[in-house]
Amino acid sequence: MNYREALQHGFLLVKDKAVLTSSVIKKIQKMLEHNSAGFRSVPGTSLKRSDGITVYTPPQDKQTILRLMDNLEVFINDDRACELDPLIKLAIIHHQFESIHPFYDGNGRTGRIICVLYLVLTRRLDIPILYLSRYITHNNLNSLLETGLVDRIKLGRAYYYMNIPLMNLFMNVSDSTNDDSIIPIESVSQ
C-alpha cells in the first residue's frame, strides 16, 4: 500500500509543480519507509551479494551525494541540459539515481517511482499506471526468465529481476568497488 500512496502523492506533486525535485524524491521515500532520515549522511553503505562479496559501493559522503542529486535534478528538469530521447534519458536517470543510492533504504522502489513520474513529467504517461514489479509478480515470472529478457539476481536477502539486455545497452560495467560510473550527467550528452 505504501508504494501506491507514494506514487500517487509524487504524481500530484509533479502535476502541480511540473518538476521532479530532490524534495519530491525525499517525500516519496519518506512515505515508502515511514522515516524522515533523508539522504544518507553516514558512510558505510555497500551492496553485497548473499555470500558477503561487495558488488558496489555508492558514494559515501553527504556532500558528494548532495552534489550528485543536485546534478540529477537539473538533468531531469532542464531539457536544455540534454537533447536525448526521453526514454534514453529515463534509463540514464534511473542508472544515476540507483548508482548514487542516496537513501539508507527504499532506493529501488523510489527509483521505480522516479521512472514513472519522469514519464508523466515528459507527457509519455497521463497517469501513473506503469508498474513493472506488479506485472512480473502477477504473471508467470518463470516464462520471463526463460526468454532471457529478465534475469534474477540476489543481493543480500532480496531478489531483483532485471532486464539485463536493456541494462547492457545503457551501461558499461565498471569496477564494482569504485564510483567511476557516477559522473556529472552533463558529460553524457557531450
Image (cartoon, rainbow, N blue to C red):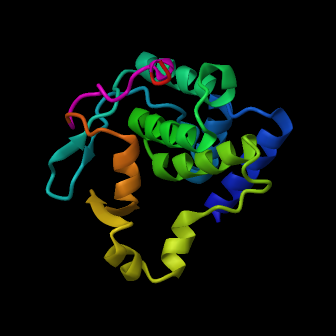
Whole-percent x and y of residue 72?
A: 55, 27
In the image, is 47 to the left or to the right of 95? left
Front residue (pair 13, 168): 168
Residue sitting at 56 percent across and 42 percent down? Answer: 90
- Report the quarter where the N terminus lies: bottom right
Based on the displayed image, in which of its 4 quarters is residue 17 positioned?
Answer: top right
Q: Which residues are magenta?
A: 176-187
Whole-percent x and y of residue 145?
A: 35, 74
Q: Is residue 182 magenta?
A: yes
Residue sitting at 20 percent across and 59 percent down? Answer: 50
Principal secondary structure, stretch drawn in magenta: loop
Residue sitting at 72 percent across and 46 percent down? Answer: 10
Q: Determine whether 93 is above or below 2 in the image.
A: above
In the image, is 23 to the left or to the right of 13? left
Q: Determine whether 116 is above or below 56 in the image.
A: below
Residue sitting at 15 percent across and 51 percent down? Answer: 52
Front residue (pair 86, 126): 86
Whole-percent x and y of residue 110?
A: 55, 47
Residue that extends furthest to the right in the rendered view of this protein: 16
Based on the displayed image, in which of its 4 quarters is residue 75 positioned?
Answer: top right
In the image, is 106 to the left or to the right of 123? left
Residue 157 visible (yes or no): no
Tally of numbered discs: 0
Q: Determine whether 73 is above or below 111 in the image.
A: above
